[in-house]
Amino acid sequence: MLNGLGLGATLLLFTTPDLDEVLSTMERHRATVFYSVPTAYQFLKDYDKTTRFNWKGLKIITSGADTLHESTINDWDRRTGAKIQEGYGLTECSAVSHLNPMGRSKTGSFGIPLPNIGAMVVDHDTNECLPPGEVGELLVEGPNVMKGYWKRHEDTRDTLVELGGRTWLKTGDLVMMDDEGYFFFYDRKKDMIKYKGYSVFAREIEEVIHQHPQVKAAGVVGVPDPGVGQLIKAIVVLQPEARGKVSEEDIMKYCEENLAHYKVPKIIEFRGELPKTDVGKVSHRELREEHEE
């Protein structure tokens, strides 16, 4: 929104996911930029009227707030012929810290740091800087990073850390940086599952299950177990036409064919929908709390 205000542009804001309204309004006002979240692209790529709008005519199409599944990106490309630029940010760093460069996006990456923003990957226990190719916690610093949480001094101390004479924001996200400086999201630190001593990324399993042609959505969490630490549980939403036809064993077998043995979910549960956050993310917190209770 601030980009549009700074340019004196017309802003078209949608408070409900009415796809007909989105498409007709963008066409009527000849929109040139589209900011949205992965859930919206998931709906739009399957919507029968999506191609009535010329998506290739837009200058910028970006996605943030959650992970954009590779299957969604590929389906979107085939359907619209337009490219989505993935980005990354947090409220604590004034919304955005990374974005894929125009014309040089990497599929699966949320891009590189914006100008004047520093980013590094560290061991999430020791804060030691890790080399490219290793997974650790993302830290960012720059003029966009907050001074602290209002009247929450303990949370501020836990989130802001002094390293090398600069103040860094601990994002709580586990990422990897490649040799070219592009960053790739793996999981929220709190969503990582410990199974028999292995560190398992819930997002990796979700990505595989999401690629099953009969799956609409999936959420993966760890269920406390005294024998192994945490059992891996997948909560799966099937496509409407697949409900009652695809079994737990079918999903388990698909995972066995596409994942290492220790990453295969031990529990599969089908539901009609998953709990979501305000921006359309799967709410892993709510899923975890169900088992904690």
Image (tube, helix red, strand yellow):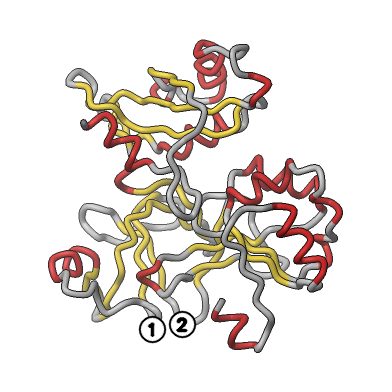
Q: Quadrant of residue 217?
A: top right
SS state under label 2 = loop
Give percent across and percent down for residue 176. Answer: 45, 53
Mark 2, Cα crowd under 10 Å, few <14 / some 14-19 / many 20+, is few
Q: Please give the name of the residue rendered at 20% of the width and 69% of the height, measured from the top-left corner.
A: 156
User: Is residue 180 shown to the viewer in this render?
Assistant: no
Q: How many marks?
A: 2
Specify the amino acid type for callout 2.
Answer: Asn
Give percent across and percent down for residue 161. Answer: 22, 70
Q: Residue furthest left?
A: 154
Question: Which disc number belongs to residue 114?
Answer: none
SS state under label 1 = loop
Asked if marks 1 and 2 touch (Cβ < 8 Å), the reply is yes
Question: Which disc number belongs to residue 116?
Answer: 2
- Above or below, 24 against 268 in this view is below
Q: Quadrant of residue 225?
A: top left
| Residue at mark 1 | 143
Tell me the quadrant of the picture where the C terminus can be found.
top left
> On the rendered structure, is 207 left or right of 278?
right
Specify the amino acid type for callout 1.
Answer: Pro
Give percent across and percent down for residue 255. Answer: 52, 21
